[in-house]
Structures are given as C-alpha cells and as structure tokens.
Image (spheres, helix red, strand yellow):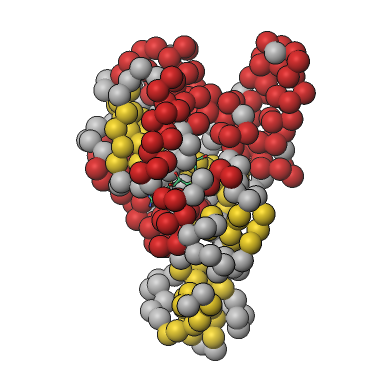
C-alpha cells in the first residue's frame, strides 16, 4: 500500500481524483496565513523562523497564505523562511509554479521534516497524515493477523501486533479491523521534539476521529469516485482516516496539544464568516459562489465535521488561535500539558 501511494503521488494528478479544502476556496489558505501571523506574534516574533508545509499538493494553500502575509503581516513575512516537505518531484514543480507569483521569498524543498534547518517553526499540514501508509490488523480468535496485499488481492498473515496498543486492554469482536499508521506517529514525534527544542506551533488538519475506533477506513478515489483499492496500484489515491487520539499520545511530553476541534469550529474561530462577507461584497457577481464555498468548508454535513484540526505548540504566550483550550485530560478543566 505504501509503494502504491508513493507511485500515485509521483505520477498522477491527485486533484483530478479528489478536491481538498484549499482548492475549494482561497479563504482556507488565507485564514491559515492569518493564523501563522498571530502564532508568530505569540511566539515572540522570532526572526528568522521556518514556515513549513508538509504535503503541499498543488501549493494552493501556501500561495494563498503568502498573499495574505505579504499584504497584512509584512514583518512576519520578512522573518519567514519557507520550507516545503514533499516527496513527489512532479508536485514540487507544481508547487514552485504556484508560489512564483505569490511570494518573493526563496523556497526550499525537503523529503523529510528532519532535513528542515534548526530554529523556531510554524508548520501546516492539510491532508498530509492521511496519505501516509497504514497497516491493518484483523481480530482472529484471541490474537491478530495482519492484512497484506499480494498479487492484487488481500491476504492475511501472522504478524507482530503493535505492543502496548489500547486494543490489548479491550475485548474486540472477531473480524474487527484495527489500523495503525506508524509514519504519522513518527512524524508527530519528530515534530514535537523540534517544537520543544526551538519553540513553535503546528496545525494538523485531516479527516479522522478522536476517540477509540475500529474499522476499515482504507479508501481509494479515482476521478472523484470511490474505487477498489486493489485495482491498478499507483493509479488511485489511497487514504485512511487519521486517529487523532493516537497522534496526541505520541507527542513528546512538554508539548502542548490543542483540540482536536472540528474544521467547522476552527474556521469559524479564525473568522470565516467575516472573510466570506468581505469577499462577497468585493465581488457581488460571485457572492453566491463564495458563500457556497464557505458552507462546503465548514458546514457539519460537508467538510466541517469529518475534518478535524489538532494544534501543537511550545513556547507560546497565551492560547493557540482557533482552539478553545488545551487538550483536556487531567480533570482540572484547565487541560493538560503533555
Ligand atoms: N495539502 C494538499 C495536498 C494533500 S495530498 C492540499 O490540501 O491540497 C498529500 C500530499 O502529501 C501530496 O503533496 C503528496 O505528494 C504528499 N506526500 C505523500 N506522502 C508523503 C511523504 N511521505 N512525505 C512528504 N510528502 C508526502
């Protein structure tokens, strides 16, 4: 599955198969640009700081964020060093093109977060974690077997079940599926370690769940429609829902974890309604379209509920914008610092 998805992102145009939030409306990238500026201020205006995006796709989110930062937060824009984490050479080219007009600053690409230079960091990741490869385990009797793909079909084989997984302490019905995504856990661990060391913050946006959950969430999309994940490896986008609880559990102690909150609540807190009306007034002929795009991003029956946002921070004065409070956990109501 891992190789099929790497081949897919390297060779296909993902955005023919699905549409992401920044492709729906410029407001998504603009609001995240404003988020970056406020976060930078609450970090004590570090100069320089790394603005990093993981899995930037077509580069639309960052291009919209850059246009906003240049216009309304020039000091932040000046202090920023722009770094993209992207493995697909073809998408790096698309991103370079998108950013050429949006920003005057140089852009550096990396294959891994560990290659980004040292220093305070603000990181954005939209639909990045869901693209990382998962493993699936199926309950059989008192144990687990792992589901693999071989010769175009699913097969099961004995395998080491991840030690210490919460599933070990709960009864799980026969045949239930458990998913793990070690690359996502490794990513947040490396990210948290960096934030602790040099300060910074991150917004991780993805569709997923934030409570213990079972079930097979692997899905493949081709031409915007669900398709068989086993057909034509490398020709369809493979994704799985993100387990935000597991993500939060892998953030190093000392990093503050915020949310997760729904994308609808996050965008509302960042001022989606005001920005929608501002754009609608400026372009009355497109007002309906602009309002429809805002609905699509934030309404609970569209992307507003299924998509969630988790924040991480270290060295921040005050709250992380967009979140009501630190992740609850110690029963004090104040939330806990991990
Ligand atoms: N953030 C974009 C696109 C999400 S698609 C948007 O909102 O539109 C997932 C992106 O992650 C693609 O750019 C893909 O090439 C990239 N990607 C997938 N696996 C990766 C990995 N292991 N390391 C870095 N980038 C990866």
Q: Position of residue 268 (x, y in %)?
A: 64, 29
Does 301 sit left or right of 214 as displayed? right
Which corner quadrant of the image does residue 77 belong to?
top left
Q: Residue at x 36, y 13 (%)?
A: 75
Left or right, residue 28 beside residue 2: right
Q: Residue furthest bottom?
A: 141
At x 70% / y 13%, what residue is drawn? 283
Q: Quadrant of residue 96?
A: top left
Q: Is residue 146 visible?
A: yes
Residue drawn at (27%, 20%) of the image = 47
Judge by depth and name the residue closer to the eye, 65 or 16.
16
Q: Position of residue 279 (x, y in %)?
A: 66, 16
Q: Nearer the viewer, residue 255 or 268?
A: 268
Above-or-below relation of 281 to 55: above
282 displayed left or right of 40: right
Q: Position of residue 157 (x, y in %)?
A: 45, 84
* Residue depicted at 38% across the width and 73% down the height: 163
Residue 186: name its quadrant: bottom left
Q: Is residue 25 left or right of residue 51?
A: right
Residue 32 in the image: x percent, y percent?
A: 50, 28
Q: Is residue 202 visible?
A: no
Check the image and report above or below for 249 versus 112: below
> How many marks on residues?
0
């Amino acid at each position: 599955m891992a190789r099929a998805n790497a081949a897919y992102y390297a060779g296909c145009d993902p955005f023919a198969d699905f549409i992401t939030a920044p492709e729906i409306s410029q407001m998504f990238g603009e609001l995240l640009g404003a988020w970056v500026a406020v976060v930078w201020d609450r970090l004590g205006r570090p100069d320089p700081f790394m603005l990093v995006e993981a899995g930037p796709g077509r580069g639309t989110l960052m291009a919209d964020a850059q246009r906003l930062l240049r216009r309304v937060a020039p000091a932040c824009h000046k202090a920023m060093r722009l770094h993209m984490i992207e493995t697909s050479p073809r998408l790096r080219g698309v991103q370079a093109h998108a950013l050429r007009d949006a920003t005057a600053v140089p852009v550096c690409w990396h294959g891994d977060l560990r290659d980004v230079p040292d220093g305070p960091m603000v990181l954005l990741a939209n639909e990045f974690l869901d693209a990382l490869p998962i493993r699936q385990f199926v309950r059989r009797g008192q144990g687990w077997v792992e589901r693999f793909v071989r010769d175009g079909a699913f097969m099961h084989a004995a395998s080491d079940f991840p030690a210490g997984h919460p599933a070990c302490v709960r009864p799980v019905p026969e045949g239930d599926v458990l998913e793990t995504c070690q690359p996502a856990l490794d990513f947040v661990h490396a990210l948290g370690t960096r934030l602790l060391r040099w300060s910074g913050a991150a917004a991780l946006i993805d569709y997923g769940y934030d409570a213990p959950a079972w079930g097979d969430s692997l899905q493949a999309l081709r031409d915007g429609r669900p398709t068989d994940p086993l057909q034509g490896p490398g020709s369809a986008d493979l994704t799985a829902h993100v387990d935000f609880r597991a993500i939060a559990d892998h953030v190093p102690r000392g990093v503050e974890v915020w949310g997760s909150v729904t994308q609808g609540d996050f965008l509302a807190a960042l001022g989606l309604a005001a920005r929608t009306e501002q754009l609608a007034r400026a372009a009355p002929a497109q007002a309906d379209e602009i309002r429809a795009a805002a609905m699509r991003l934030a309404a609970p029956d569209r992307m507003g509920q299924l998509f969630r946002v988790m924040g991480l921070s270290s060295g921040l004065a005050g709250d992380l914008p967009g979140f009501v409070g630190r992740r609850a956990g110690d029963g004090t109501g104040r939330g806990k610092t991990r």
